[in-house]
Image: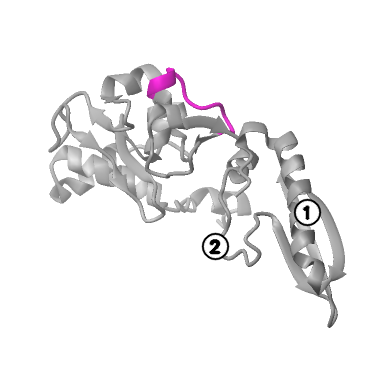
Amino acid sequence: MALTKKAKETNQLKELIVTAEMLAEIRLLVERIGGIENFNYAMDVWEYKGPKKRIEDVISPEQLAKIYYHDEDGNLFLKNNSGNKKAGDKVGFLKRQGYMMVSIRFEGYYFTVFLNKIIFCLHNGRWAKKGYKVDHINEKKTDNRPCNLRESTDSQNASNKSLSKNNELGVKGVCSRSISDDRVRVDACVAYNGKRYFKSMTVKKEFVEATVQILKAWRDEIGRKLHGEFFNEG
């Protein structure tokens, strides 16, 4: 008797796509049960917990405060023994981009988190609001003192960045390009919540320097109105 299309589909094995997150969970479970020789057992008892979760959805500020404490210099310490680390040990490591990170294991989950995010939560008794980042006020990526941390939107965080080393004019948010042998177009731009505000002037080459300062003044004025305390002149 031939199988119907529906019956064939029912008899087919469902394909499971194994992600890096799922493999990390399996690895943690293998460690818990005593090594790779017990891998088959680990696979039997392992349960996939679904899509990746944010640390805020797994660990409450109260639970976090039972794991870590911080000092006013922006250092993070363990409250209890954990693996080869002892209570009171300083935790965190420097990532290539220059930020301090910390790895956290909690109830079968594994997170690698910006250290400033953890200190902000411990200091304020809450996680940063959803959709917000934790910004370094003085732009120093390793300065995680509570007084140097604040919530910011992506737009505010971007506004607090200094002048790019690739900026040829030496003025943040202002650039120029030649449009003829003796004419130069100077552009200024401010970005805010996905929108860009532009002002341009086309002048003779001998007036470029003065024009850059005029457009810088315009940009600074608009930037302060839009970004407030987060605006960085560069």
User: Left or right: where does residue 110 sit relative to residue 224?
Assistant: left
User: Left or right: where does residue 5 sit relative to residue 59?
Assistant: right
SS at mark 1 in the image: helix
Question: Looking at the rendering, which quadrant does residue 89 occupy?
Answer: top left
Q: Is residue 133 magenta?
A: no
Question: Looking at the rendering, which quadrant does residue 61 occupy?
Answer: top left
Residue 27 vs residue 197, the one in the foreground: 197
- Which x, y percent locates residue 12? 49, 53
Picture colour scheme: one colour
- Which x, y percent locates residue 47? 35, 37
In the rendered structure, are the residues bearing label 1 and label 2 in contact, judged by CB atoms less than 8 Å apart? no
Q: Residue at x 21, y 35 (%)?
A: 90
User: Left or right: where does residue 103 sit relative to residue 34?
Assistant: right
In this figure, which residue is indicated by the disc labeled 1? 215
Q: Residue at x 48, y 39 (%)?
A: 138
SS at mark 2 in the image: loop
Q: Which residues are magenta?
A: 122-132
Residue 202 position (above or below residue 192): below
- Which x, y percent locates residue 181? 84, 83
Whether residue 81 can be seen here = yes
Q: Residue at x 62, y 54 (%)?
A: 5
State the count of labels.
2
Q: CA distance from mark 1 to mark 2?
A: 20 Å
Residue 218 position (above or below residue 73): below
Q: Residues within 10 Å of mark 2 (few under 14, many from 20)?
A: few
Say the numbered circle drawn on residue 47.
none
Q: Is residue 123 magenta?
A: yes
Whether residue 193 can be seen here = no
Question: Looking at the rendering, which quadrant does residue 154 occupy?
Answer: top right
Residue 207 vs residue 102, the one in the foreground: 207
Q: Earlier in the sequence, mark 1 or mark 2?
A: 2
- Which x, y percent locates residue 66? 28, 19
